[in-house]
Amino acid sequence: MDSLVTENLKRFKENVPKGVELVAVSKTKPISDIEQAYSAGQRHFGENRIQEMAEKAEALPKDIHWHMIGHVQGNKIKYMAPFVHLVHGIDKPKRLKELNKEAAKNDRVIKCLLQIHIAQEETKFGFSPDEALETLQTDPEGRYPNVQIAGLMAMATNTTDQAVVKNEFRGMHELFKKARQIYSSPEFKILSTGMSGDYKLAIEEGSNMVRIGSAIFGKRD
């Protein structure tokens, strides 16, 4: 009989349209849960603590794509630089510089997303839309040769008002289209918005990467 994790994952894979990448958010979850999802064919996993992600990466199959989805602290980047697949939360130019430095030490080009602050909460991090566009205009490939800016990421306001969330996601899609006109790299193609509670709205409004945690693995420990 399939495990609950496997059943949940199958349901999501059926619900998420072709062309939308599903990142299974495995933060705080045991390796056994990740192994179940891996056995069901899942390869993209998201963690929010660099050291926890590094320990899991060491213990699990090497073809897993690890996504750093939490707030990135500059002094911890070195621990994930050897293996991380995509860093979602680059929230200021300083982080691009730090990521570039650690990627160069590991002879890698690391993909990242610029995090945009769209929510009404002050506790969320990120570039303002104007700051992000300005960063993309200033030759990031020349300035940070070991970093590939692959798209944008944002988290909506934590509210039950669906109209607010929909409007924020719509604004993000408009910003993404504007950013692609400024920054024509073929690798700049990811719009990562949407989590367990709002991923359907996010996909409706142009998201092509969603981060699903509790709805796959159950409530956080």
Image: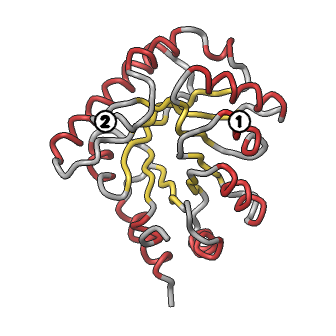
Q: Secondary structure at mark 1?
A: helix
Identified by mark 2, the residue type is: Ala
Q: Which residue is mark 1?
A: 75
Foreground: disc 2 or disc 1: 1
For label 1, the crowd category at 10 Å Cα-Cα, with few meaning under 14, some 14 to 19 and many 20 or more, is few
Identified by mark 1, the residue type is: Asn
Q: Residue at x 69, y 30 (%)?
A: 99
Please determine whether, in this image, residue 24 is positioned above or below residue 189. below
Where residue 220 appears, x then y in whole percent?
46, 67
Say whether residue 43 is left or right of residue 154: right
Q: Residue at x 53, y 37 (%)?
A: 89
Where residue 216 appears, x then y in whole percent?
44, 68
**Coloring scheme of the render?**
secondary structure
Please determine whether, in this image, residue 173 is positioned above or below residue 69. above
Q: Residue at x 61, y 59 (%)?
A: 43
Please determine whether, in this image, residue 69 is positioned above or below residue 132. below
Q: Which residue is mark 2?
A: 119
For label 2, the crowd category at 10 Å Cα-Cα, with few meaning under 14, some 14 to 19 and many 20 or more, is many
Marker disc for residue 158: none
Q: Residue at x 51, y 16 (%)?
A: 183
Where residue 29 appears, x then y in whole percent?
56, 68
Where residue 111 appears, x then y in whole percent?
63, 34
Of label 2 and label 1, which has the lower sequence position? 1
Number of marks in the rendered image? 2
Mark pair 2, 1: CA separation: 26 Å
Q: Secondary structure at mark 2?
A: loop
Q: As rendered, which of 15 and 160 lies closer to the eye? A: 160
Say whether residue 198 is left or right of residue 95: left
